[in-house]
Amino acid sequence: MNIIAKHRQLVTPGDLVAEGKFRAGQNVIKLNGDRFYATVLGSFEIKDRDTLSVRALRGPYIPRRGDKVIGKVVDISMGSWTVDIRAPYEATLPAGRFPARINPVFDDIRKFMGADDFVYAEIAEFDRARPPILDATLNREYGLIKQGVVIEVEPTRVPRIIGKKGSMIQLLNRELGSQITVGQNGRVWVRAPSPEAVSNTVSTIRLIEAEAHTQGLTSRVEERLKTLKNASQKIATENKE
Amino acid sequence: MVEAVDSGSKPLLSPDGIRTDGRKIDEMRKVKMEVGLLKNCSGSAYIEQGKTKIIVAVHGPREAHPKHLAQPGRAILRTRYHMAPFSTSDRKSPAPSRREIEITKVIREALEPAVMLDEFPKTSIDVFIEVLQADAGTRSAGITAAALALAEAGIPMRDMVAAVAVGKLEGRVVMDLNEEEDEHGQADMPVAMMPNVNRITLLQLNGRLTRAELEEGLSMARRGVDQLYEMQKQALREKYTSSESAQEED
Amino acid sequence: MDSVNSISEAAPLRLRDLNAVLATGVREDGRKLDEYRNIDIKTNLYEKANGSAMVRIGNTVAVAGIKIARGAPFPDTPNDGVLTVSLELLPHASPDFEPGPPDEGAIEMSRVVDRGLRESKSIKYDELCIIPGKSVWIIYVDVYALDHDGNLQDAAGLAALAAVLTAKLPEVKVEGDTVTELETKRPIPIVETPVPVTVAKVGDHLLVDPSAAEEEVSSVRVTMTTIESGVVASIQKSGSDSITMEEALKIYDLAFARAKEIRGKLTAALGVSPA
């Protein structure tokens, strides 16, 4: 039993992480006898004493049942929408799982949602053998996105943008008066009272995304929010004069 | 049978084993690697090996198009090795040559053993290798950079892949030919390997080697691959090492 | 974007069955693992060609024809003749082969034949020079795969080699810049016999001269072209798997041993051997 990589150490594909009697968890394979190697770039973790895994730092969004995602309509067919969710697989949103009374025989579903529209929904089914199925009826927040802007971020950065128990989003919402919805698939929906507030929110999210890997991120974000607030107050005063 | 040396007047190797560019027999050219330099792709890498300069972009895994190419149980790996028209002394026609088509195939087959394609059924992973300047060893440097770009894209791999060409000058096996050596040398043998599982994923030979030279060439390639593998890891760490602390905070 | 299909997409359907058979050291068709199929070589089949050959390896058939023309040398080799190989997988050979531009598998096969023959330096290109910098012999080797029962690579390579060994060039008279072709003929100056031998890997077994069924389940094929002295003049690994260093050397030993036997058959069949 010999653990070679340190807990939370950055590893790259092919790195030997441990030798001996372990279990290969996510992104770890057993080769050359009892030797365990990382298969992706990421952070090495040991769970439950003997399960070795690597949390990927990069890579595509892989859908999981229950994930809240922001999709973009790419195609419309009889009774369903084809939705890009930034995964290797395009998702399907059946008309029956859209929050509106639709009669798929008589209604043209385009009336409800067309190409390039964004939709907030949940992954209802996914097993890699078939395309993911979305459902936009499971929560009243779900449905067509009618206002605000949607931006794309690195899916692996999503946890940092959300923050511990949503702390980062709450901070932004409080300080900028915005309303932020983060899709697990790396799309962020921003609504704010003014174009200026939207722009400030987006630029702050970009800062979090770019510096997600640095320490003291929260205090730096707070500092930036303060600067933004002062600047906007100054402009407001100048406008009055 | 006499092994003719057709290197013209200038010897490619001095009696004390120094090459025309000052390198020793088993010395690789200067190598520079960088990852993540392109924004609009899943992963990217740049390599300089001597004057050879290559940029690689990876897209995917994404839905395979056209759809009939999709495989139910695995992703397909598609590669494209291409040389820029300005990459050579005489302008190269941009249309893919037979040489490029063959290299495209052997590069794909050099990467396939490493990429865990069964993780992404029905998708395609596309690797675009563009040679910006060619000074020998482009397929091997292309493979080294392609593996790096795949790793940067977060695509799971059983092992990294790195490649180097070994050759023969004045009857001696040498590491990593430059263009002059490639043109006038007696053999050129590109070798790609997976360093941890110690397996060859690309092997070609152009030129003449005895069995002993073949064996020596393979061992030398192995040493070159080890050096390149270290540099690949270094390139990834340089770009992402600060991310370690990121995970600590969550 | 290049196609992902090669000549035979590896489909390891019967791999387990085949592995069980191979573990006994005997192949489906009764051969030993290191045994080549019967080779049949016929030459001078087409009068209008300068040389031609048909090679049959078991049920695999390839034919090569040679046409010779005078032309300008490459600027970087003004004193050398030129040899060019092209290969076509005729629709006759397999229901999987379509007419049209060659796919990457056919291009690879053709370039491996070309490298084995040309890059082995066994042909004396300087003896194909007519007027330095102006006129040289250009040897076109066109290979057709006629029937595909595995190992088209060797069949194509051997057909090309046999055609080169038996082809004839006209002697010429040079007066200033005027070249006159004479009635007398001479062979193409070739001093060694570069013989390709392909070894396929199925499971953990190395099989010499794979049949189509074996190729289908093989993960890797390696073609090595060796000459009389034991020098290996070209190598090509093909297929989406890997080999060990030991396997590479084992393949060399197999390729060299089989090439020796094939060379004997070739010399007997042609009644000629390299100068």
Image: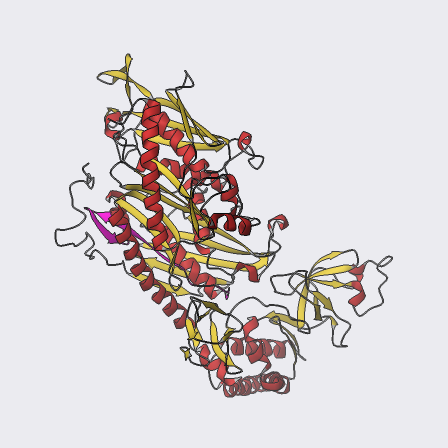
Residue stretch in magenta = B154-176
Is residue B112 toward the left or the right of residue B204 in the image?
right
At 34% across and 49% down in the image, what residue appears? C250
In this view, the residue in front, B23 or A181, is B23
- On whether residue A32 falls in the magenta region, the answer is no
Quarter of the figure that contains the C terminus of chain A: bottom right
- List x then y, in percent, for residue B168: 24, 48
Asked which quadrant contains residue A202, the reply is: bottom right
Is residue A55 toward the left or the right of residue C166 in the image?
right
Asked which quadrant contains residue A13, the reply is: bottom left
Instruction: Identify the image's colour scheme: rainbow, by chain, secondary structure or one colour.
Output: secondary structure
In this view, the residue in front, C25 or C34, is C25
- List x then y, in percent, for residue C63: 44, 27
- List x then y, in percent, for residue C111: 40, 38
Q: Is residue A86 above or below residue C142?
A: below
At 43% across and 29% down in the image, what residue appears? C143
At 40% across and 62% down in the image, what residue appears? B197
Residue B36 shows in this picture? yes
Asked which quadrant contains residue B64, the reply is: bottom right
Q: Is residue B227 above or below residue C61?
A: below
Q: Is residue A96 above or below residue C199?
A: below
Disc tally is 0
* Residue at the limit of the structure toward the left, as seen here: B15
At 41% across and 36% down in the image, what residue appears? C154
Is residue A103 toward the left or the right of residue B207 in the image?
right
- List x then y, in percent, for residue B250: 53, 84
- On whether residue B169 falls in the magenta region, the answer is yes
Quarter of the figure that contains the N terminus of chain A: bottom left
